[in-house]
Structure formats: structure tokens, C-alpha cells
Image (spheres, rainbow, N blue to C red):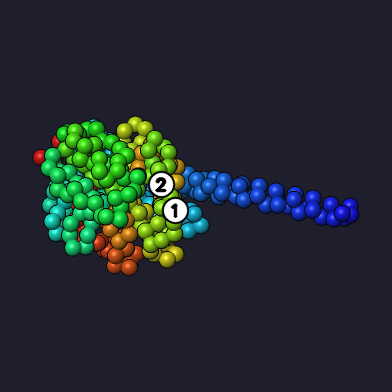
Amino acid sequence: MTNSDKITINLKAVLLLAILAIMQVLPIIASDKDSIALVNAKWQTLYDGNGVQLKVANFHIFNAPQNVTILTYNVKEFSLQVGVCDTLVEVSRMAESLKADFAINGSFFDFAGPALTFIKRNGCVHSSGVSPEQTSRTNWGLVVADSNSRSVRIIPSVYNDMIQKSAAYDNVLASYPLLLHGRTICLDSCDYVPNKFNNRNPRSFVAIDSDGNVAFVTIDGRAEGKTMGMTLYEECKIALWLGFTDALNLDGGGSTTLWTHTLGVVNYPSDNKMFDHEGERKVSNILYIRHLFSP
């Protein structure tokens, strides 16, 4: 082997090492860029008072425009409850009928009507079914509230321990995947596989911060040039960067809806394929809160 050959081999080795180093650094750079974009987002406050803050921002992150709406509330002021209906109905209509103050769409359901997850409302189990293809999933989560709902938790679960884990709570909603638990991302390997569910979609999730405050979060999507939605992993990163310790994905897509009793629907539901507040999908269950001193 000539010196020229050795030099060529050495250069190739150095180039390969450089490429590998760049591949390791690029995700970190991209992550830093995206987290900074979130920090620098110009949030518009829609409501701030009585233990609730509601804000929205449209910004560029993950190489796409995104519209994110966050409602955060103090658990000492509001009770968290689960709403469920035997027939499909819009989030706004169900929330109004329950005299809710604020509401977000809940977990997954069959378009024929029944919920496809475990639901317990005011101590009564309304649904214990789980779609067969999700029984092997290891990262289910339960959002649970005690009898006066002053304590709300998100706890890890699997499909066959939900009844046991929910026994001490009056209001329970199961969903998947669990996004964060103790600030650790909880996605299964199946959640990274490109498919209709995992790819970019409108997203809804419920989260808790280190102070015990609870948040309803929507990420709009399916509006080219305005808001694209997120993958499950991107949703995890957003929840982490927003400072939440625990977060649970809810039904998304056309179901993604955040409603208030004074402003109506405040995000941009996509079921009508228009970038407006009118595109609600009918759903079978919701999470909602009422002020503890409401009549």
C-alpha cells in the first residue's frame, strides 16, 4: 500500500467520523432552535382571572407553522369531571348541557357512538372497553380526579389494570399514549412508526405542572400554511418545553376542540376543512371543569 493510498484511507475515515459527529449534533441544534422558537412565541392572552389563564400563539416550529392554545387552571378553584354521552355530540353542546366553564375533547371513540377507552364518571363506570388493537400497548394513561376533584393526577396504566387503579377516584378517563411521566417521554416503539395516527395531526392533551396546575392543550393542524399539526414525538417535546411534568395524549385529528363558556370554541377544529372555529366533530366524551363555587 502506497503512502497516497494510506492518506486516502485516513481522509475517508476522518470524513466518516465528521459525518457521524454532524449527524449527532444536528438533532440537538434543531431541538435547541425549536425550543427557542417556543420560548420566543408571542402569546396572546384570551382570558386571565379566577384561577384560569387561556392563551394562544401561532409560530414556526419543527419546520412548520403551528397554532397552540393552552388553558391552565388552579385545581383549588375548579373541579375536573368527565362528560360522556351515548350518542355523538359536539364538545360545545355537551359542555353547555353539563354547565361547564371550560372543556376539551376527550378520548377515543367509535363513530357508531361508544367510547373505546375506560371512562368513570361520578363514581360510575360508563365504559370499560378497549379497542382490540390497543390491548398490547404499554403506555396507556389515566387522568384521575378525587371526589372533590381538588387533586388531579395522570398515572401510567395498561388496559387490564384500569379498574384497579381507578378504584379510589370518581372521575377517570383513559387514553393513549402517555406522553410524559415525571418529565420522561413515554412513547412506545410503535409510536414512532410513520402511519396515519403517528404522523402530523391536530393534537389534544391534558397535562400537569410541578405546582399541580392542570392544563388543556390543543395543537391545530390540517391547514396548509397556517398550522400543520404535530407527530406524537413533537407533541411530547412541546409538553416538555412548556414545563409539564406529566402529559396524556387525547383523541386528536378532527376531534381536537377547546371550548370556553364565554368565548365558545377558541381553537381551529379541522373537520370542516376550514381555518375557523366552526369545524367541530361530534364526540362521545369530554374533559371539563366547573368552578367549585358554581351553583
Residue 156 in which image quadrant: top left
In the structure shown, which secondary structural element does the residue marked by tag 1 occupy? Answer: helix
Residue type at tag 1: Tyr
In front of the other: 121 or 267: 121
What percent of the width, then of the height, locates residue 232?
40, 52
Asked if marks 1 and 2 touch (Cβ < 8 Å), the reply is: yes
Q: What amino acid is at disc 2? A: Leu
Residue labelled with disc 2: 187
What residue lies at 14% left-to-right and 59% top-to-bottom?
87
Determine the residue located farthest toward the left in the rendered image: 295
Q: Residue at x 12, y 52 (%)?
A: 97
Q: Which secondary structure, mark 2? A: loop
The Cα–Cα distance between marks 1 and 2, rounded to whole angstroms, is: 8 Å
User: Of the residues under marks 1 and 2, which one precedes in the sequence?
Assistant: 2
Q: Is residue 44 above or below residue 278?
A: above
Residue 27 seen in render: yes
Please give the residue where the numbered disc 1 appears in the rendered image: 192
Q: Residues within 10 Å of mark 2 (few under 14, many from 20)?
A: many
Residue 53 placement (x, y as % from top left) = 31, 42
* Residue drawn at x 17%, y 60% as measured from the top left: 113
Task: Check the image and report above or below for 155 versus 203.
Answer: above
What x and y, as percent, mark residue 120? 17, 43
